[in-house]
Image (spheres, grey):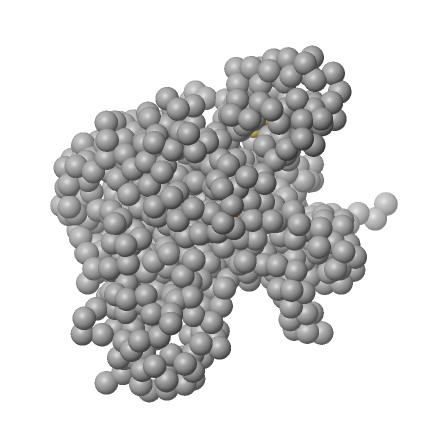
Amino acid sequence: MVTLLNTVEDKFAREICRDHGDKSDELLEILHAVQHEKGHLSDGALRTIAQALNISRAEIHGVVSFYHDYKREAGAQFTLHICRAEACQAVGADELITEAETLFDVKLDGGGEDVALAAAYCLGNCALGPAVLVNEKLYGRVDKAKIKAIAAQHMAQNS
Amino acid sequence: MSVKIYIPRDSAALSVGAFEVAEGIKAKGGDDVQIIATGSRGMLWLEPLVEVETPEGRVAYGPVQPEDVKSLFDADFLKGGDHKLRQGLTEEIPYFAKQDRLTFARVGVIDRLSLEDYEAHGGLKGLKAALSMTPEKIVEEVLESGLRGRGGAGFPTGIKWKTALAQTSEQKYICANADEGDSGTFADRMLMEGDPFSLIEGMIIGGRAIGAQTGYVYIRSEYPHAIRVMRRAVKAMEDAGWLGQNIGGSDAHFDLHIRVGAGAYICGEESSMLESLEGKRGQVKVKPPIPAISGLFNKPTIVNNVLTLATVPFILSEGAKTYADYGQGRSRGTQPFQLAGDVAQGGLIEMAFGVTIEEIVNEFGGGTRSGRPVKAVQIGGPLGGYLTPEQFSTSLGYESLSEAGGMIGHGGIVVYNDTTSMMKMARYAMEFCELESCGKCTPCRIGSVRGKETLDKIAAGDDVAANLDVLDDLCDLMEEASLCAMGGLTPMPVRTAMKAFPEEFTGPLEKAAE
Ligand SMILES: Cc1cc2nc3c(=O)[nH]c(=O)nc-3n(C[C@H](O)[C@H](O)[C@H](O)COP(=O)(O)O)c2cc1C
Ligand code: SF4
Ligand code: FES
Ligand code: FES
């Protein structure tokens, strides 16, 4: 039987592990770095990381599934993270979410090809809510018009 | 000579256009202006707030939008000229002038990444003092200041440090908790983005106090900007010899690492955070042992909130007594309150403990932004209680709030207007617990789901009296049998909402009669 055990499946993931000294306590950082580059965490990447850090695949799956940030499947081109925590609710976050769902024709946390909407639970912009985070950029006092403009701007940057 | 212009590069200010404004001023002002990137003064409704240095002091203009730049130049704002956005001297704006800025003394004032500016404003004074003190003396000083943890639990910092110091282990750790998951809070973020060196200085002092030569800052991934600023600040301190071997020419060593969370509220709980720092699932651990005895990699570890650690340099440089002179009862010093939600003047308000809710919400905050009446405030994050305007004379301190049935938590205050459905907020509390439970114990993991369902039944008018009893029992169970405060305190927002607004928990009929 052919065994894949000694061949590196995902060269990029292997490199990242090496950058982190193949240390298992740096697993979260490694996962962040791989996902940042690839958009999600593939089976191959996880197998490579598990092997490099000498941890079991069950363990790595346990970690990946525990944290909300990690994605196992390729998602939309970009994701608008809309805060639905209390301070933003107090200034209309729920209405904004409904409007955004209609605008982009996707559901909150429901995937999408171009644009996806993801719920966020506080983005630290609670005095200027509703708050939205896109590609590491934070927006405040977001309303329907502003979220449309934000999406258009990021869409233009992506293409 | 070019005029100095201070513009925050704080993510809240950037979220409403501070970068575009800075670019606009730079383009138009050319060599006449020198732009300095600061943190935010915390008057967030005035962001982007542009400050111009004049012989009288810094003159503030805000909220400035890119399209205002031309008219600002026309009004000769470089000389402090009059303009509809002119707010006067920054430090005379009542919102700012009335505060007790100790922890946040430099935030919004200095170039956040200039060590020179930091030192010119009192930075490193505390560390220099600490380097000539014994660990015991540092701990004693912190004890005497009365400083308590600002992360939520309010545990006396000096006592925690004393326990860690007493451990004989060669290897110890100090960790800054920058997970700041509580909705309605942003003080850790503002501090890291506006005065990152003060957190680092506090950690070096803490390391020396307990005998730790390695530190970690665990920052939530929702704060990409703070992460970038902290990384640059660590690099700057390393380059200047304040991190690494022989700090400041002394025999002390200290290495600091930045780690990023991955979107899990529970990782703010200290045992969960330590698991996460080891690269594991952030599951809460049973205490004892406490981290000060066995924490990260089973070594003695101190976990403190960002604000707690960033306050330590002040205590060491100005003296424990100076700090302890602020406050009331057993709540010594100051708390950076964070005012948010439907409020006209939201922002960061650092005040001595003892200030009332009324002063914060109505005097500083100026009531709601929508102009509607205030219905309730939630204090202390998603696990904190709802208080009504009838309780606004309550003073803000650990003990006084707990007597009023609430908690101060991390100091967040969220304002809700009269259109808020308290049933919806109660349901959200249960839903949040369901989403963020680490899953280790049943009362939290299952109780939250049952709680949400039960509230739905009550809202639908389904056997209301019986379901209210079910909910009551469930809350008792969660409070008594949860391993940590996630499950243990989720009933607090639910119960305080029900107690203050019982009429909203009687089924659909009353709701329609509103
Ligand atoms: C569910 C939960 C979430 C918490 N989140 C945070 C947090 O985001 N930041 C924080 O500093 N402390 C948080 N804490 C409190 C920590 O467990 C711990 O008490 C604190 O970091 C200790 O530092 P301090 O003594 O300086 O407050 C949380 C606790 C619980 C139970
Ligand atoms: S109360 Fe909830 S979050 Fe805390 S240990 Fe139990 S299951 Fe985990
Ligand atoms: S509650 Fe929305 S940003 Fe904090
Ligand atoms: S202790 Fe394991 S679920 Fe209760």
Q: Which residue is drawn at 69% across and 12% down?
A: B466
**Image position of B46 (left or right of B139):** right
Residue closest to the eye, B144 or A46: B144
> Dividing the image into four equal quarters, which quarter contains ligand 2?
top right
Q: In which quarter of the image is residue B494?
A: top right
On the image, the x and y values in percent for residue A92 come to 60, 49
Q: Residue at x 53, y 42 (%)?
A: B417
On the image, the x and y values in percent for residue B402 come to 38, 24
Determine whether B17 is above or below B28 in the image.
Answer: above
Q: Which residue is drawn at 49% across and 49% down?
A: B371
Residue closest to the eye, B179 or B68: B68
Residue closest to the eye, B299 or B228: B228
**Image position of B309 (left or right of A102):** left
Determine whether B18 is above or below B186 in the image.
Answer: below
Q: In which quarter of the image is residue A18?
A: bottom right
On the image, the x and y values in percent for residue A17 come to 58, 53
Quadrant occupied by the N terminus of chain B: bottom left
On the image, the x and y values in percent for residue B59 come to 28, 69
